[in-house]
């Protein structure tokens, strides 16, 4: 393992060189600390872990490097700095938080970024003034380079305003984003989204990145349920703050490759998926809520093998729909040429077969023209 020496940090920008993005234009911004200093110790530890992993896997297997780096992050978060400080910068999901008074919050990517990255920041509430800074850290250096900085003005007139940038100069760098409160006794609620440019699911290099986040929330209902996740990409169980939830790992949780099973009662379990979206099945769906990529998640199966004859079905009024071919909620579903799915509406026919759709949002209305010809299952339960 390489020796880590924290280098003295010198300011990268001179006075007046940092720009503030406001509704009126660009104005000089100020920050109280040298650029990129907040994440230096964290990044030093991550690069040291990265060096060990590359020795084990080789530099070419980026998908395995990503998986192992996320696991190492969880170990570090449990035992050192991340337990009380930095949060994981999650790709493909929206992270929410509140900066209060003069407080700070730092998000750090748990592994190097491969290719470009999109960052979007939104002020969603409260009236505080906040300084935002994004930095990149190359391997071998403990000091970073500022790639973006601006100040979000105080007041309520800019609530709902977004700031977005795409960076094509961060390949093979660790990226950090810092929020620093600038108002005494005031705060600001924010949303932060990070993804690879052009896609929230894959790296431009062709290697599989963290594609989806899955949350099984046992606190959303009473009772207890077993869950099973299988059939998609590699699963990494998470611990700590993940996808906006405080998730934990219990002794009876089992994870191997693309298969996981466990139980939730009063707690929350979370998984990062590297690759294809898996099948999620709850033994008692009423006892927990499922969230995928920050959105409420449900499954719908129209089972024509359980009835007689054929029927048209229509689905409308809920979340966005995605038709599935393969296994969904333990059913083998297919896609036919006369099925039509657009946004949050769908229509099709079943006659002895099964159609299945994922719902990202609230449960929609499902209507059968001939109810005797099929059975509808929502989240694995017959309706």
Image: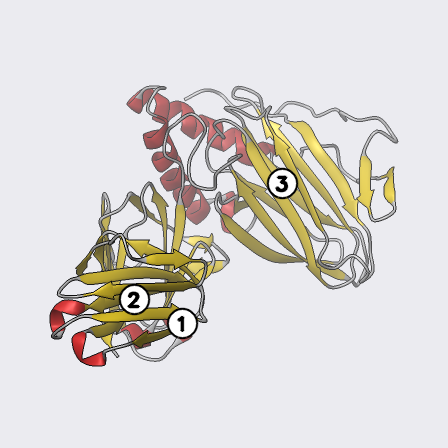
The residue pinned by badge 1 equals 364
* Quarter of the image with the C terminus in it: bottom left
| Crowd around label 2: few <14 · some 14–19 · many ≥20 (10 Å) | many
Horizontally, residue 65 falls left or right of residue 100, namely left
Residue nearer the viewer, 244 or 354? 354
Instruction: Point out which mark residue 300 bears.
Output: 2
User: Is mark 1 in CB contact (under 8 Å) with mark 2?
Assistant: yes
Q: Which residue is mark 3?
A: 177
Q: Nearer the viewer, mark 3 or mark 2?
A: 2
Q: Which quarter of the picture shows residue 96? A: bottom right
Q: Residues within 10 Å of mark 3 (few under 14, many from 20)?
A: many
Q: Position of residue 120 (x, y in %)?
A: 63, 45
What residue do we see at 44% from left, 63% from top? 344
Q: Quadrant of residue 151?
A: top right
Query: Which of the pair 351/39 is nearer the observer?
Result: 351
Query: Mark 3 or 1 closer to N-term?
Result: 3
Cβ atoms at labels 3 and 1 below 8 Å apart: no
Residue drawn at x 73%, y 37% is: 149
Question: In this image, 55 relative to 82: left or right?
Answer: left
Q: CA distance from mark 3 to mark 2?
A: 38 Å
Q: CA distance from mark 1 to mark 2?
A: 9 Å
């Amino acid at each position: 393992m390489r020796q880590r020496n924290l280098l003295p940090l010198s300011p990268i920008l001179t006075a007046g060189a940092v720009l503030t993005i406001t509704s009126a234009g660009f104005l000089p911004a100020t920050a109280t600390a040298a650029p990129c200093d907040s994440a230096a110790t964290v990044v030093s530890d991550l690069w040291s872990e990265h060096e060990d992993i590359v020795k084990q896997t080789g530099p070419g297997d980026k998908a395995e490097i990503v998986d192992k780096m996320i696991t190492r992050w969880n170990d570090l978060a449990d035992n050192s700095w991340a337990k009380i400080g930095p949060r994981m910068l999650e790709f493909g999901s929206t992270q929410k938080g509140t900066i209060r008074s003069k407080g700070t919050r730092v998000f750090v990517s748990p592994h190097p970024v491969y290719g470009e990255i999109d960052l979007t920041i939104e002020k969603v509430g409260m009236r505080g003034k906040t300084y935002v800074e994004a930095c990149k850290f190359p391997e071998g250096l403990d000091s970073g380079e500022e790639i973006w900085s601006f100040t979000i003005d105080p007041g309520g007139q800019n609530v709902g305003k977004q700031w977005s940038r795409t960076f094509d100069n961060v390949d093979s760098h660790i990226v950090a984003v810092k929020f620093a409160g600038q108002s005494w006794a005031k705060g600001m609620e924010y949303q932060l989204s990070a993804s690879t440019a052009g896609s929230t699911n894959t790296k431009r290099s062709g290697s599989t990145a963290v594609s989806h986040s899955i949350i099984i929330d046992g606190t959303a209902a009473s009772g207890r349920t077993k869950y099973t996740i299988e059939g998609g990409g590699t699963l990494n169980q998470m611990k700590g703050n993940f996808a906006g939830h405080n998730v934990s790992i219990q002794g009876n949780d089992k994870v191997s490759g693309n298969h996981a099973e466990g139980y939730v009662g009063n707690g929350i379990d979370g998984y990062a998926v590297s690759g294809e979206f898996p099948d999620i099945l709850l033994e008692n769906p009423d006892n927990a809520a499922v969230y995928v990529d920050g959105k409420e998640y449900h499954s719908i199966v129209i089972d024509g093998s359980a009835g007689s004859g054929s029927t048209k079905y229509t689905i409308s009024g809920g979340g966005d729909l995605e038709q599935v071919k393969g296994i969904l909620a333990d059913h083998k579903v297919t896609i036919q040429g006369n099925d039509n799915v657009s946004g949050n509406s769908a229509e099709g026919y079943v006659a002895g077969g099964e159609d299945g759709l994922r719902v990202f949002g609230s449960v929609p209305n499902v209507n059968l023209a001939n109810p005797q010809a099929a059975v509808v299952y929502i989240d694995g339960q017959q309706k």
